[in-house]
Image: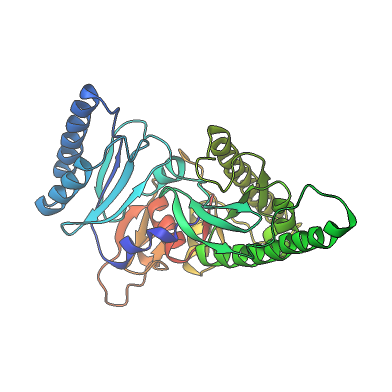
Amino acid sequence: MQLSFLAPPFDRGGPWATVYFDPAQNDESGAKRRELSVRDACRMLEEAGADAATVQAVREALTDIGPADDPAGRVIFAAGGNVVLSHRLSRLPQGQIACWATLPRLTPLLELSSQDPVCLVAYIDRTGADFELRGAAGPQDAGRTEGRQWPVHRTALVDWSERHFQLKVENTWEHNAGEIAEALGTAYEESGADLVVLVGDPRERPAVRDRLPEVLRTVTVETEHGGRAAGSSSSALEGAIEQARQQYTRRRVDAALDRFSAGRVGTDRQTDAVEGVPAVIEAAREHRMDTLLVRPGGPDLARETWIGAEPDQVGVRRTDVQTLGEGDPISVRADDALLRSAAVNESDVC
């Protein structure tokens, strides 16, 4: 999971209010539960020492969250009287989470929105394609491309006089497959997507895939469900997209664990695998943290760690942190400190 979308909270100082919010069901009793949940979250923040302006900003943001738009809820990060980031969750929080601390509370996000790859869906026919991003923020338009519009349909005749026309049709299909592949490659690079799902025409899909660069083909899958035409979406298509995202996640996590195991036993000379809070903090301080593996519920997650204003100003002891006159080191949880480093330095997190 890439946490670069969490960079905005780290562009400014704290302390931070963090709330993981369950919007409840969309009925009368659900509305009452939401009202009580908002009240409880704000009370918890006040008791923890949050300022009135930040509590009010959180209250207004939580009041606007409903099950229709956010069925799995949201996480709110607020400081200085403003909501700095509101992020949609992919799984409901199991119980109210509201805290006031030096850093945003990030570890629950790994379970509630973790392993949520961004998927670029290409809806293909023989004339072009529409692109759509699927991720935690919901479906987003990612552009489209149109190829040659004629000739694209074969005739029913098979005599010699029609063969030249049939060849032109097939040439159009081939040409358009190349244009779609090129546009898809550009959309993939610009969107930062993790994987691609090809939807639509059964002949054009493999033709497009064959023309993709090798690195893109390895993260591309096809589905026979759905199409480019309006109204062709279905529950089967939604299931296929979700399955593709889950399979991508499993492969990525398995690969990270394999690299870690190989690095730990020394069979992979290019991988320096370390474990335990002190060793990982040292790697973060020295900008050597490519991938951070976090086990939710691990015993050392809440271990006292010291930080300065910059992400690489981190240590297991107060004296490890050189703040260069920017204020005294501050005590925080180890997981919050390491996830801050991962987010700012664009390290992968599993």
Q: Nearer the viewer, residue 164 or 89?
A: 164
The reply, left or right, for residue 40 in relation to residue 179 is left
The reply, left or right, for residue 107 in relation to residue 149 is left
Give the percent coordinates (x, y) of residue 303: 40, 48
Residue 170 shows up from this direction: yes
Give the percent coordinates (x, y) of residue 62: 22, 42
Q: Residue at x 67, y 46 (%)?
A: 222
Q: Residue at x 41, y 62 (%)?
A: 315
Q: Nearer the viewer, residue 269 or 59?
A: 59
The reply, left or right, for residue 125 in relation to residue 347 is right
Give the percent coordinates (x, y) of residue 235: 53, 33
Q: Which color mode does the image show?
A: rainbow
Question: Which residue, as the protein is rendered here, is positioned at the far top?
Answer: 29
- Quadrant location of residue 322? bottom left
Q: Nearer the viewer, residue 324 or 172?
A: 172
Question: Which residue, as the protein is rendered here, is positioned at the far right?
Answer: 160
